[in-house]
Amino acid sequence: MAKSKTVFYCQSCGYESAKWLGKCPACNSWNTFAEEVITKQGSAKNEWRQESSSKQRQSKARTLDEIETAHDIRWNSGDQELNRVLGGGVVPGSLILIGGEPGIGKSTLMLQAGLRLKEQKVLYVSGEESEQQIKMRAERLNDSSPGFFILTETNTKNIFQVTESLSPSVVIIDSIQTLYSSQMESAAGSIGQVRQCAGELMRFAKETNTPVFLIGHITKDGMLAGPKVLEHMVDTVLQFEGDRHLAYRILRTTKNRFGSTSEIGIYEMLGTGLREVTNPSEILISQKDSNLSGITIGATIEGNRPLLIEIQSLVSPASYGTPQRTPTGFDQKRLNMLLAVLEKRCGFRMGVQDVFLNMAGGIRVEDPAIDLAVCISLISSLEEIPVSDKFCFAAEVGLGGELRAVNRIEQRISEAEKLGFGEIYISKYNQKAIGAVKSKIQVKAFGKLTEVFEDLFG
């Protein structure tokens, strides 16, 4: 006879309580507890560890000297952008969670990545689409693999039975919210079910040394659906971002136990699937026939990758009282600070102007090195003076109107030179970092924002 137990989970952090609480003692969130009914069975046959008793291993404590170092711990996924985001490749036994908005291309990305693994045995588990629908998408991608297997199943017990007989090298779950375990009586997609299924998949990945990709949905706030503990259980959390109405997608790392969390991968959505963008600076800089005011090019760094991004601004007199400040892809508080610097230190009347700022290409930039490019773009739009498309900017602006040095300036200069820019404006405090490196691009170094204005606008 199965014993039932009722517990309450916090939907924000995953805290477990025996009774309902108005305020979570772990994360201090209000009204976030949800009730879940757990069924404790006498023999949990659906758990991976008890179902594959023949593959159990005895744990033994060993010293660091006794552990052998694995030189080739990663293997190539066939997707260079995915390899970059994961830190150099897929780590065996890792649990990877990929989240994104509906229709952004999560299933296409994972299906495409699975089909590229020609020499691996891949199991694609779908709980949302039928085999025929996946077949249609694979035909649209115009790719196939003899070792790619499709399973339409939502019960974890049946999934583990197939994995035991098939022994795949990679498992892809689409999606974690559709799975359910008979250990719990709650419906699929509930907090308890997501937590239980993720726990079983984590044990499977660690014990069999098989990488598992989990596709997850997100909420209206942009957070991954389900308990917050799900993000703590997995090794890597990837966020697939972009506008469904635009062609470009960004794969961003928010957590990575085996690599950097500042890497991004850029894709272009085509009719035949996702195309890897190896030189994102070319797509982030629009092609135009003539110079327009309010457009500048800033040199930024995303992870280990230098990017040149186009910054567009529109400054016009405020007609409805309080001026508007509307940035897209840029921090609004940072924009307000730069506007205050322009008014206080440089003498421009920005307090009576509507300001609209846009990072072209749909990318979000948090690097302070584009401060100078933003200020030049704003003054260019205010004074209706175009800036040459052969000029590039890389410097941080301080509250005193001074130009501060930025890191990895050599890579920014090299990227600007590679794309054919003639001049790059930097802080004079970065000159020591450049050293005696000779480049075709002309490097102009200044100490104050007003000095740059005098050089550009006279």
Image (cartoon, grey):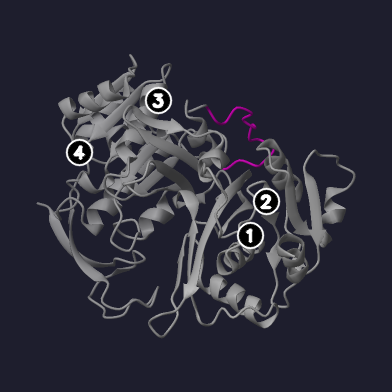
SS of the residue under disc 3: loop
* Label pair 3/4, CB-CB below 8 angstroms: no
Q: Which three-letter amino acid code belongs to the residue tagged 4?
A: Gly
Q: Which three-letter amino acid code belongs to the residue tagged 3?
A: Ser
x, y percent for residue 100: 34, 49
Q: CA distance from mark 2 to mark 1?
A: 8 Å
Residue 209 visible? The answer is: no
Q: CA distance from mark 4 to mark 1?
A: 47 Å
Residue 230 visible? The answer is: yes
**Residue at numbered disc 2:** 392
SS of the residue under disc 4: loop
Mark 3 and mark 4 lie on one chain; the one further toward the N terminus is 4
- Which residue is nearer to you in this view: 3 or 350? 350
Q: Which three-letter amino acid code belongs to the residue tagged 2?
A: Cys
* Label pair 2/1, CB-CB below 8 angstroms: yes
Q: Is residue 398 above or below residue 79?
A: below
Q: CA distance from mark 3 to mark 1?
A: 47 Å
x, y percent for residue 48: 30, 38
Query: Which image quadrant is residue 225 in?
Result: bottom left
Mark 3 and mark 1 lie on one chain; the one further toward the N terminus is 3
Mark 4 nearby-residue class (10 Å; few <14, some 14–19, many ≥20): some
Tag in front: 2 or 4: 2
Which range is magenta? 60-75
- Which residue is nearer to you in this view: 360 or 199? 360
Tag in front: 3 or 1: 1
Query: Which image quadrant is residue 73 in?
Result: top right
Q: Is residue 70 magenta?
A: yes
Q: Which mark is residue 169?
A: 3
Which residue sits at x=43%, y=47%?
Answer: 238
Left or right: residue 63 versus residue 183 is right
